[in-house]
Image: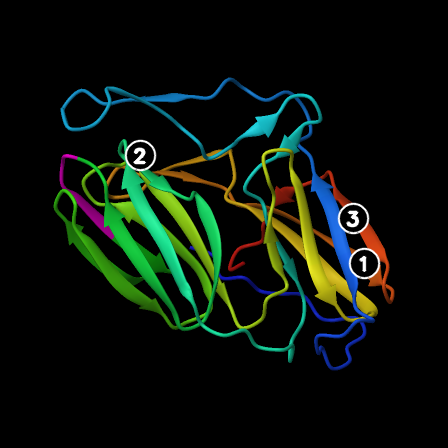
Amino acid sequence: MRRAGLLSLLLFCALPVSAANGTIEGLVTFTGETAPRAMFANRDDHDCPHGIAQNHLEVRQQNLGIRNVLIILEAAGAREVQSRQAKLSVKGCVLSPRIQWVSLGTSLQVTNEDPGDHRIHAFLKTASAFDVPLKPGQQARRPIVQPGFYKVNCDRHPWERAWIYASEHPYVAITDTNGRFQISEVPPGRYAIRAWHEGWQEQGKDSQDHLEFQPMEETRDVKVQSKRTASVRFDNLSPAPEGR
C-alpha cells in the first residue's frame, strides 16, 4: 500500500470558494501498445462467473486515454469539505467503483449484491482498516477517518480489488473513460499536480494470491489564473517511488 505523499506547493494562498477561482482540466494517456484485457479463470466458486475480465487497466484506443487515474492537487491548508456518504458494492464478483475519492469522516456503505458470500478487507499501508464479512444482500457501514490510499480486497476471491483515496481537501479528480479529468474552484496560484494509477506491471502475488502491480505516477506544475481554465497533460507515467 502506498500513501499519497503530496509534493510541495509552489505558491500557496488561502483557498476559499470564490467567483475568481479557476479550473484545471486535462488528459492522461498511455504510452506504447496496450495488451488485451486479461481474464481471471475461476473454476471453484460457482457463485461467481467462471471468467472475470480484469479492470486494473482500461485504455481508450482512440486517444490512449487511461481511465481511473487519480489526480491530486497539492493544497496543504486548503478548505476542508464536509464528510459525506460513499458506496462500494460487489456485483458479479467485481468490486465497484474500481477507485474513488472520499473526504475524511465519510461513511462508506459496503454492499454485497451477489448470491454468494464475500469478505471485504481494506488496508491502509500494511494495517487492516476494516474487515467486513457479507452474506448475500447484506450491507455494512464503515467510517473513513485517516487520509491516504486504502487498498480493498475480497479475502475469498483473489481477483477482487478496489481503491479508496481519502483526503482533507476537495482538489481531487478521477479520469473518465476518455482519460480526461477536471478540478474546479481552484484559487489562482502555481501548484504541483500529480497523476497516480494502481499500475499494470505485475509484481507477483500476496499471501492470499491477490495479484500486485507497480503503482505508476507523474507530477506536473500548473498555473491557475482567475476565471480561466488551465490544461495539463500527463503522458509519461512511471513507477512511483517506494513509500508513495
> Residue 232: which disc?
3
Amino acid at circle 2 = Trp
Query: In x, y percent, where is residue 216?
Result: 58, 44
Residue 165, position as x, y percentages in the image: 48, 58
Residue 1 or residue 181, whichever sits in front: 181
Q: Which residue is mark 2?
A: 159
Q: Residues within 10 Å of mark 3 (few under 14, many from 20)?
A: some
Nearer-the-camera pick, 168 or 17: 17
Span colored in magenta:
115-120
Whether 201 is drawn above or below 163: the answer is: above
In which quadrant will I find the C terminus? bottom right
Residue farthest to the front?
19
The quadrant holding residue 67 is top right
Residue linked to disc 1 = 222
Q: Earlier in the sequence, mark 3 or mark 2?
A: 2
What is the total number of numbered labels drawn onto the structure image? 3
Q: CA distance from mark 3 to mark 2?
A: 33 Å
Mark 1 / mark 2, whichever is N-terminal: 2
Q: Are marks 1 and 2 in contact (CB under 8 Å)?
A: no
- Asked if 98 appears above or below 23 in the picture, the reply is above
Secondary structure under the numbered disc 3 in the rendered image: strand
Q: Tell me the kind of residue under disc 3.
A: Val
Q: Are marks 1 and 3 in contact (CB under 8 Å)?
A: yes
Quarter of the image where the N terminus is located: bottom left
Label 2: how many Cα within 10 Å (few below 14, some 14–19, many 20+): many
For discs 3 and 2, the disc positioned in front in the rendered view:
3
Asked if residue 140 lies left or right of residue 185, the reply is left
Amino acid, disc 1 = Val
